Amino acid sequence: MENREEINDEINLMDYINVIKKHKRLILLIVAISVVATGIVSFFSPKIYEARAVIMLANLPREQGGMGAIAAQFGISTPSTANVSEIVSLLNSNILMEKVIKRFNLLPVFFKEGLKENPSADITWRAIRDLKGIFKVKHNQKDGTIELSAEYKDPKIAADIINYILIELTDYMSSETKRVAETNKRYLESLIDKNSDPFIRQRIYALIAHQIEISMMAEVKENFAFKIIDPPRVPDKRIKPNRSQMVMISFMVSLFAGIFIAFLREYIGKVKAGG
């Protein structure tokens, strides 16, 4: 019984091999057309370059001597160190993308043709979507860093986009911190004349000094909210298209497709012959 099963398996395997041999020209033709077409497409596909940067959060001035608790007694908020999720959310926000596009005049980059014909608000939204498709943010929880990347057909523009976003992020966070500090300072100054207790007045002056310190730190901007661990550079090698990978995948897929078509033709021929 076992010998008969082995013989039947060998016969079935030989049948499969014979079908492939019979239609080998068809299979080779399908593979050749697919591989050549893939090679041509990959050759004429636009080259895509990727620029990268790595940043790490920096700490704002810490409240000393229970300064935060004292500030809370007067009903004011003190600027705190931004966390990673806030930075990532801001980097992915529409408002930051729009500010970058308008400040650095990126509309001509995305719409080289037809910009003058349709200078509407809709084109800004299209540019925001395009920029979000180019720009990516990745949080590395292990070492607490944030990786920024931009893919574009022009390597310099890819690096410029990262630089523009980092500049706008710094300015936005700096201005927001200064705004909060200035608001707190004005409010605290209004409390001085309302309190005659020298101890309370001393605390108010200390809080005002702390708000001034925070505002001065925000004015410096460099390494204020984050540190640039690895600045963006103009990439020298493309990341897309990967021609060798595309050709290999095309070869494998077309080979299986060719074998499938060969067996399908053989099956249809047998059905017609039997009919």
Image (cartoon, rainbow, N blue to C red):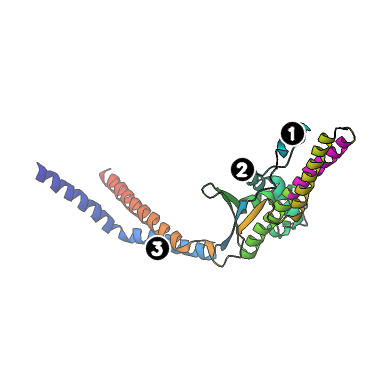
- In space, the residues marked 3 and 1 are separated at their CA atoms by 74 Å
Type of the residue with mark 3: Ala
What is the magenta range?
Answer: 174-192
Residue tagged 1: 72
- In space, the residues marked 3 and 2 are separated at their CA atoms by 50 Å
Q: Examine the rendered structure and indicate whether residue 169 appears above or below residue 187.
A: below
Mark 1 residue element:
helix
- Could you tell me which residue is drawn at 85 percent across and 32 percent down? 197
**Main SS of residues in magenta:** helix
Type of the residue with mark 2: Ser
Residue 174 place in picture, x, y as percent: 74, 50
Q: Examine the rendered structure and indicate whether residue 100 appears above or below residue 207.
A: below
Question: Which residue is situated farthest in the front direction here?
Answer: 198
Q: Nearer the viewer, residue 264 or 260?
A: 260
Mark 2 residue element:
helix
Residue 252 place in picture, x, y as percent: 38, 56
Q: Is residue 114 magenta?
A: no
Residue 85 is tagged as: 2
